[in-house]
Image (cartoon, helix red, strand yellow):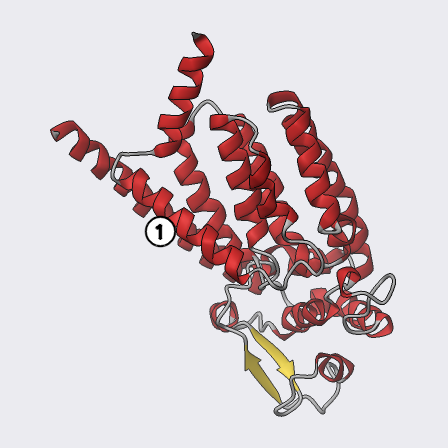
């Protein structure tokens, strides 16, 4: 009993320490990003602004269907916010998350059109989100414009997907790999790198998916991994498809412990069509599952460790 209480205290301390380390890293990284002078990014922001306006706001790529929409609405906000940063006030800019708008206007196209004109009258705070995407996008805007960042995104995300699927095949099996391929096809993965807004959650899902596969024999660490990826999703994501990070990681965790479960793929496959809509009830169910799992971790009754031990014990018999 004493050992159990001691172990619970150690686990709790780990989560608390990890929480504060993540918050510290988020704030410092945003402040450093906001210290980049506007003059360093203004040229590529101008090119990016023109590129988004020429493409149009939220125009479907194919078949005039919502399933093929690129969220240039949110990408336009991201470009606007990257310009609105005041490097002379990095802490204020990091915490407020301002964008420059026409008075009382939420029209992204109008705000981008007038971004460099005298018509812009006010900064509007979008501070209810972390805007951690800026840590990546704003430094890239020093060297590349919107179109060039898209090309880089295609290269790196495709390579990451190949590595992820290769590891799924090697360590879990062909059925799991096929299911992931099917899931990614049904969310139109090929358009994700073309949209900065969509990209962050898919990068996190693939990276932490690889981490979970590498740690498949250490299920006692899974809780910290979920805690971290959930926190980083809140930091980097601008309300796109946070279900992706939970879905991919949850599926991999279950597979690592008890083998192939066909129905669980609904978590991924169910998120078809426009990937950032109609996932509320799925998010609610998954959130409840996560709360239950974290509770088990903290009270030293980890169900995944139990299932893993049972599976490996039966396998050895």
Q: Name which residue lies at 72% across and 60% down.
A: 141
Q: Position of residue 307 (x, y in %)?
A: 40, 27
Where residue 144 appears, as percent x and y from the top left, is 77, 57
Q: Residue furthest left?
A: 2
137 lies left or right of 113: left
At x 62% / y 53%, what residue is drawn? Answer: 200
The structure residue drawn at horizontal position 61% and vertical position 91%, both measured from the top left corner, is: 104
Nearest the camera: 78 or 252? 252
Q: Vertical placement of 109 versus 94: above or below?
A: below
In the structure shown, which secondary structural element does the residue marked by tag 1 occupy? helix
The furthest residue to the front? 263
Which residue is drawn at the image coordinates 48% and 71% (left, top)? 128
Q: Nearer the viewer, residue 162 or 64?
A: 64
Residue 296 shown left or right of residue 312 in the figure: left
Quadrant position of residue 85: bottom right
Q: Is residue 232 visible?
A: yes
Let me know if residue 35 appears in the view. no
Q: Which residue reaches farthest top?
A: 317
Count of marks placed on residues: 1
In front: 312, or 6?
312
Q: Identify the residue under disc 1.
A: 20
Percent x, y for residue 296? Answer: 31, 40
């Amino acid at each position: 009993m004493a050992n159990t209480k001691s172990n619970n205290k150690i686990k709790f301390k780990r989560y608390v320490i990890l929480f504060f380390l993540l918050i510290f890293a988020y704030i410092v990284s945003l402040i450093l990003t906001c210290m980049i002078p506007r003059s360093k990014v203004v040229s590529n922001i101008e090119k990016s602004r023109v590129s988004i306006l020429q493409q149009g706001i939220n125009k479907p790529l194919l078949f005039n269907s919502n399933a093929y929409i690129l969220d240039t609405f949110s990408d336009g906000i991201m470009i606007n916010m990257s310009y609105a940063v005041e490097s002379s006030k990095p802490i204020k800019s990091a915490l407020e998350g301002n964008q420059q708008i026409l008075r009382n206007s939420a029209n992204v196209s109008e705000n981008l059109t007038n971004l460099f004109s005298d018509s812009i009258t006010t900064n509007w705070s979008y501070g209810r989100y972390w805007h951690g995407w800026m840590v990546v996008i704003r430094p890239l805007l020093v060297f590349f414009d919107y179109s060039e960042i898209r090309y880089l995104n295609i290269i790196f995300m495709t390579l990451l997907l190949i590595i992820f699927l290769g590891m799924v095949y090697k360590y879990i099996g062909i059925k799991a790999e096929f299911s992931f391929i099917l899931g990614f096809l049904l969310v139109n993965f090929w358009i994700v790198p073309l949209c900065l807004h969509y990209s962050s959650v898919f990068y996190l899902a693939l990276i932490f998916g690889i981490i979970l596969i590498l740690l498949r024999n250490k299920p006692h660490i899974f809780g910290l991994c979920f805690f971290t990826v959930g926190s980083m999703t809140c930091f980097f994501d601008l309300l796109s498809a946070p279900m992706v990070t939970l879905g991919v990681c949850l599926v991999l965790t279950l597979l690592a412990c008890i083998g192939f479960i066909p129905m669980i793929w609904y978590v991924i496959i169910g998120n078809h069509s426009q990937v950032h809509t109609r996932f509320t009830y799925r998010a609610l169910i998954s959130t409840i599952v996560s709360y239950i799992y974290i509770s088990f971790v903290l009270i030293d009754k980890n169900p995944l460790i139990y299932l893993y031990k049972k599976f490996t014990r039966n396998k050895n018999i």
